[in-house]
Image (tube, rainbow, N blue to C red):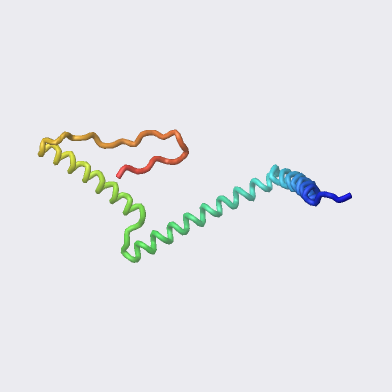
Amino acid sequence: MATDPSAFFRTMLGEWEKLAAGVGGDALKTDQWSQAMNGAQNAQLDAQAAMNGMTERALAAANLPSRTVVADLSARIGRIEAALERIEGHLTGAPVRAPARAKPTRGRKPPEPIA
C-alpha cells in the first residue's frame, strides 16, 4: 500500500503552522513585545529625523535648496502663473476659468497636487 507524499507534507505543514501560530500568538500578546516594537519604531523615527537634519545641513553648506524650499517655490510659481492667466483673461476678454480645486476621493490614496 503506497502512501501519498503530498498528504504527509500537508499534514506536517499544518502541524508546523499550528505550532508557530501558538508560539507567535503568545509572544505577540506580551507587554515586552509591544515595548520592543514601540522602541524600534521610536528608534526608526529618530534615525529618520537625524538623517533629514544631516541632509538639510549638507544642502545648506553646499548652498543648495532643500526639498521643502523647492516645493514651496513650486507652489508659489503655480499661484503666480494662475494669477497671470486670470489677468490675461481679463485683458483679452477671454472667459476666465475658476481655479481648479481638488475633489475629495473615496480611496486611501492621497489626492494628486494640482499643477
Q: Is residue 19 visible?
A: no
Q: Quadrant of the C terminus?
A: top left
Residue 90, given in percent of the width and then of the height, sits at 13, 36
Residue at horizontal 39%, vertical 61%?
A: 57
Frontmost residue, 4 versus 31 = 4
- Tell me where residue 62 appears, x and y as whole percent: 34, 66
Q: Eyeballing the image, is 68 above or below 57? A: above
Occupied quadrant, residue 97: top left
Q: Position of residue 89 (x, y in %)?
A: 15, 38
Residue 6 seen in the figure: yes
In screen coordinates, is 56 left or right of 4? left
Residue at the farthest right position: 1
Residue found at x 72% / y 43%: 25
Q: Name the residue nearer the viewer: 109 or 8.
A: 8
Decide: is 105 above or below 36: above
Residue shown at the point (64%, 46%) measured from the top left = 34
Residue at figure coordinates x 47%, y 55% from the top left: 49
| 63 lies left or right of 54 | left
Percent position (x, y) of residue 64? Answer: 32, 62
